[in-house]
Amino acid sequence: MASRRTSYLLASLLISCLLSFGFSYKELFPSPKIFQKFQPEFSEDDIFDKSGISKPLHPERHILRAPTTIKLHWEITQGHRSPDGVRKLVYLINGLFPGPTIEARSGDTIKVGVRNLLKYEGVAIHWHGIHMKGANRMDGAVGITQNPIQPGCNITYEFGIEDTQAGTFWYHSHLGIQRADGLYGGLIIHPPLIDKVHKTKTPEYEEESLLLMGDWYHRYAEDVQASYVNHDSWGREPVPDSLLINGMGSFNCSKAVQSRPLDCAQYSSSPLVLNQPRTRLRVVNVGAISGLVFRMPRCHMTIIEIDGGNEIERSPEVSSVGILYPGERMDLLVECPMGSEAAGFHLSITLDAENFAIKNKALTPTHTFPISTTANVLTKRGHSYLPPKIVKGEGYFDLAEVNGTALPDNSFSMIANHTVLLYTKMEILARLGNVPVGFINRTTWAAQSSPPEPLVDLDRVDWDKNQLVPWIRISRDQSSPSWVDIVVNNLDEKGHPFHLHGYDFYILSQYYPTRRGYHAYDPFDPSTPPTSSDLPGGPYNLANPPLKDTVYVPSQGYVVLRIRADNVGIWFFHCHILWHSGAGMAMALEVRYHNE
Ligand SMILES: *[C@@H]1O[C@H](CO)[C@@H](O)[C@H](O)[C@H]1NC(C)=O
Ligand SMILES: *[C@@H]1O[C@H](CO)[C@@H](O)[C@H](O)[C@H]1NC(C)=O
Ligand SMILES: *[C@@H]1O[C@H](CO)[C@@H](O)[C@H](O)[C@H]1NC(C)=O
Ligand SMILES: *[C@@H]1O[C@H](CO)[C@@H](O)[C@H](O)[C@H]1NC(C)=O
Ligand SMILES: *[C@@H]1O[C@H](CO)[C@@H](O)[C@H](O)[C@H]1NC(C)=O
Ligand SMILES: [Cu+2]
């Protein structure tokens, strides 16, 4: 790690470089105060600015320095917090909820010593979206790559960030359903300003902020899951009570339902504070179940990247965007006029009601946060603000329509070398006690338990009946890569956002059936050629497919995902709705070299 002295050297070097690239000092260092606080030690205890919901990021600490090893020490505990006014016992990392934000650059190594100071529970941390190349065992998936870190024990996660990865990521517990009680945090990989991989371009913004947002339950995750995996639920998912952004929200105490009294203080919504004319918002859906629709009417807003820094065909200026499902990310460029607060400008987040079959009177589906711009900020477009030209009703950008940019790799072949065909559904079966159970093909996932070792430590013959793990063999000679298609047919009446560890995939097809209903379902037929318009979802998009690590599989529809199988290991693949994966909607993919 850089010493204080070399970092100051770097800092002065940095300014001269910046000037030579045409940036002003002020643009990259929003305020001299922040510059003075410049902490070369990558302090992990940057406390949230309680004056607003956004978490400021610090690219200036990373974009001009050499790659390094970022060493962190985390202690996991629990404590009472009232994030939206309602008191609840949540998980803490070094006393923080959400956990500390990790910021790094491409090419860094991240080394996190995690000490479990919980009394009775294990923990494990997954680094969502990071490829973990050569570090499969650091992936944090309990039952697949590790056993839980037992109370009182530590482990050290150590993994390199590839030179080609930069973007918005996050980390969260991958043991059971702990994520819903707050065991998560942000993980931002900044692209270095000057390097061969990321083209140097003038940033279109002067500040970056992180918004970890998602639904929130006032009950403990264990109670929520128990109410779902119960014959009384009839498969209807528990509905959340609230919404948090960076661990802050506001709950209307008078809406608490009688049967569940709450220790509630009435909070008003904190503002979204914009300190600079143009802001890059890195938005993560950290919730358990709900998709989110994001609205900033009257501000200028465009979508620039999806998931872990994957570029897209630039969207037009929009006023709202959705649906962002649990696990998904989007990076937005926003510009709001000075004095937005006085003018009543606001950010509003609506929880999508797809899984809200049970009525929850406590929930306000749309949460609104005032936008406040600090004084002295003039927009780049001049002193007078021009509201975006958005025709009424046309300002919504549907993330399902997003296109990728460049053509994939030259060797992206028309027909994949392997195809993994899957069917998924939540089922309620008498032989399984009439409770909802998640299936992929005929398998319900549960962490490997007999013997109780992670799959990476066992021979295949020793895996138990809850493991569905198709096996892809690849050649060490990467001049002839193996392309693998993963086809997920969703037989369910509900959509499922699936996440694959260790990879980004191209979405070659995402089929939303127009004729809904039990008998109208036409699944993907693997014998139909990919170029055929006879496929329900039409021919594959081999021109500009978007690249992602989490994808929504529409109800009674399907997706075709393509990966370049070049990352060996056993990689979890699961629905990111916590109650579904907790009920077994999960599996893994194993990629191995020949003769190993
Ligand atoms: C866990 O971490 C603590 C503090 O860093 C250290 O003192 C202790 O030896 C570690 N224990 C194990 C089992 O690694
Ligand atoms: C809270 O909810 C009650 C009942 O629905 C409503 O009358 C009241 O205006 C709400 N208060 C706030 C601050 O939104
Ligand atoms: C994506 O590309 C398709 C085909 O090229 C086009 O019809 C569609 O409008 C594009 N979507 C967006 C959001 O630009
Ligand atoms: C899943 O089931 C389908 C239909 O039986 C089968 O064709 C496919 O190979 C199965 N997939 C795996 C990975 O076993
Ligand atoms: C994958 O398929 C392509 C096109 O059919 C072929 O050229 C390539 O050699 C295959 N790769 C492997 C590893 O078999
Ligand atoms: Cu699901």
Image (cartoon, grey):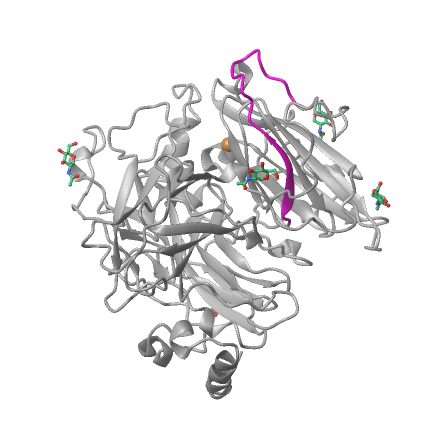
Q: Quadrant of ligand 2?
A: top left
Q: Does 29 appear above or below 204?
A: below
Which residue is at the front of the view, 132 or 105? 105
On the question of residue 250 being in view, the answer is yes
On the question of residue 452 being in view, the answer is no
Return the x and y of residue 551 as percentages of the image width and height: 56, 39
Query: Horizontally, is 543 left or right of 52 in the view?
Result: right
Q: Does 341 appear above or below 71?
A: above
Return the x and y of residue 134 as percentages of the image width and height: 69, 59
Query: Horizontally, is 242 left or right of 107 in the view?
Result: left
Query: Horizontally, is 420 left or right of 166 in the view?
Result: right
Task: Name the residue rendered at 15%, 35% in the picture.
Answer: 254
Which residue is at the front of the view, 316 or 561? 316
- Which residue range is magenta in the image? 503-523
Which residue is at the front of the view, 27 or 518? 27
Which residue is at the front of the view, 425 or 61? 61
